[in-house]
Image (cartoon, rainbow, N blue to C red):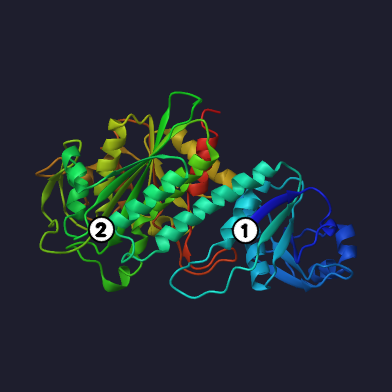
């Protein structure tokens, strides 16, 4: 789908549809209202169009024009970045439903064209490969605003990489085990101009990755770790940012077996790794001036005669011993070795993403990503870039007291506490033991990585959360 910027009037264009985003309580531009026969103003006056976020009202055919459809898209009462992003995606999906080949999105001068381009590309995504679907009809999106075409191009590239993350999360585990996931990650990394390295189970054994290997030992599909690196020719400074992703391609809970109704979505437990693939491939294509390496820790958590047992004590890559209290607390184990490896490779800053705890959904629902870490400036930077692109984060405390439930009786650590109190925070405190004081942030995306129902700008399925935030963080690094 092509996304371009046009600074002239919409009537100069040959488009099938025009989308007009409007805030709640606002009025339509008088000239536009007159050109549309006064219909927008009438719809607002009668309350048929309220401007509520997610609202969409259709006007059929503009007189004396090729435009077949006009969509009034609601932005809500006080539009923020997330509303503009959603409105662009909703406009594209509305145009597709009406079988339009092209749609122009009318943006006010203060609207962000990058956000609109990202939103339009995001709206195009549909799960594919397992269900017959009609061809996507929208071929062209035109943003009616000022600005250079490079802005729209950057937004399109970012959206494509968000949709890559979403596609990966939606692939069922029978087609995406650790080996297949590693192969796909390598292929995407090479296409984005990244340096690629895939570590198999023998490599991991030589590295002493006992925690990652312990998670994967119950499966006939052995674990993998993938490194994808972007090395700019003229970096802005000596920093080396590492993006670390949890890649559990399917999580049965291991011998601590999940209930049946908690298991069917567990193909999404590699969502953190998918997020990081999306971010690093966008970084490779957009080429910011900061060194970035992505580490993906991949395993399948299965019950079998070779599976790790509750009560087993394992040794992580950094030499710490861990008593496995619950084999369903496996994500923190694969991340532990990946965090250690990031430090070995020279990380100056680390960000990890993971569908780590059910507790985060209890705390924050599906609205915000939990943000934890040991470095306020890094956390604040993530939250700021999130606000700029419409992704929401919420910082949680990291007091030393929260580590107490994770201290082992017969080992350095245990992988789960004795109760469910502060589960998101105690999991983060466990991870902190493997970052060796390096500035670090942890994103728990378990509540936000999946849309349980269709949204105005997206179908039911993966959300691709945090990709856009991390791309912006890299683009603005050092500024």
Please state the horizontal and vertical placement of residue 270, each as a whole percent of the image.
35, 56
**Image position of 90 (left or right of 287):** right
Q: Quadrant of residue 351?
A: top left
Please state the horizontal and vertical placement of residue 77, each as a whole percent of the image.
69, 57
Please state the horizontal and vertical placement of residue 478, each as a whole percent of the image.
52, 28
Which callout, 2 or 1, points at the residue further toward the start of the chain?
A: 1
**Image position of 225 (left or right of 121):** left
Residue 414 in view, yes or no = no
Give the residue pinned by disc 2. Answer: 300
Please tell me which residue is depicted at 69% across the width and 44% down the height of the picture.
149
Residue 227 in view, yes or no = yes
Q: Secondary structure at mark 1?
A: loop
Q: From what the image shows, is residue 392 above or below residue 176?
A: above
Question: Which of label 2 and label 1 is nearer to you?
Answer: 1
Give the residue pinned by disc 1. Answer: 1
Please state the horizontal and vertical placement of residue 41, each as a whole percent of the image.
84, 66
Q: Secondary structure at mark 2?
A: strand
Q: Quadrant of residue 42?
A: bottom right
């Amino acid at each position: 789908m092509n996304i371009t910027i046009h600074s002239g009037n919409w009537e100069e264009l040959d488009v099938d549809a025009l989308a007009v985003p409007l805030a709640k309580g606002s009025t339509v531009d008088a000239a536009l209202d007159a050109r549309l026969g006064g219909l927008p103003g009438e719809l607002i006056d009668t309350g048929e169009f309220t401007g509520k976020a997610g609202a969409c009202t259709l006007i059929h055919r503009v007189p004396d024009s090729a435009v077949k459809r006009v969509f009034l898209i609601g932005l809500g009462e006080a539009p923020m970045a997330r509303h503009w992003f959603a409105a662009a995606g909703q406009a594209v999906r509305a145009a597709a439903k009406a079988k339009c080949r092209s749609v122009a999105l009318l943006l006010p001068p203060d609207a962000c064209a990058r956000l609109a381009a990202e939103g339009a590309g995001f709206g195009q995504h549909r799960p594919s490969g397992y269900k017959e679907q009609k061809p996507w009809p929208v071929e062209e999106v035109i943003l009616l605003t000022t600005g250079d075409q490079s802005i729209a191009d950057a937004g399109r590239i970012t959206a494509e990489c968000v949709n890559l993350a979403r596609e990966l999360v939606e692939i069922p585990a029978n087609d995406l085990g650790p080996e297949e996931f590693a192969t796909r990650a390598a292929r995407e990394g090479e296409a984005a101009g990244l340096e690629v390295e895939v570590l198999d189970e023998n490599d991991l054994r030589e590295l002493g990755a006992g925690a990652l290997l312990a998670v994967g030992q119950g499966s006939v599909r052995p674990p993998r770790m993938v490194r994808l690196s972007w090395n700019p020719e003229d970096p802005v400074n000596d920093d080396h940012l590492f993006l670390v992703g949890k890649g559990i391609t399917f999580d049965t809970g291991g011998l601590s077996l999940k209930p049946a109704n908690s298991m069917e979505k567990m193909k999404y437990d590699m969502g953190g790794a998918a997020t990081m693939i999306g971010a690093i491939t966008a970084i490779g294509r957009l080429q910011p001036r900061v060194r970035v390496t992505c580490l993906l820790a991949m395993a399948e958590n299965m019950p079998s005669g070779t599976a790790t047992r509750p009560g087993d004590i394992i040794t992580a890559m950094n030499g710490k011993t861990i008593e496995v209290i619950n084999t369903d607390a496996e994500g923190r184990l694969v991340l532990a070795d990946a965090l250690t490896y990031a430090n070995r490779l020279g990380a100056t800053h680390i960000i990890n993403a993971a569908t780590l705890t059910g507790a985060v959904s209890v705390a924050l629902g599906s609205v915000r990503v939990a943000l934890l870490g040991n470095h306020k400036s890094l956390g604040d930077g993530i939250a700021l870039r999130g606000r700029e692109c419409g992704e929401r984060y919420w910082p949680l405390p990291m007091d030393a007291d929260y580590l107490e439930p994770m201290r082992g009786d017969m080992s350095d650590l245990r992988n789960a506490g004795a109760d469910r109190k502060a589960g998101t925070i105690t999991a983060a405190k466990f991870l902190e033991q493997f970052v060796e004081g390096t500035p670090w942030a942890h994103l728990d995306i378990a509540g936000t990585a999946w849309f349980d129902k269709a949204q105005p700008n997206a179908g039911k399925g993966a959300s691709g959360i945090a990709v856009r935030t991390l791309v912006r963080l890299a683009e603005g690094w050092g500024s």
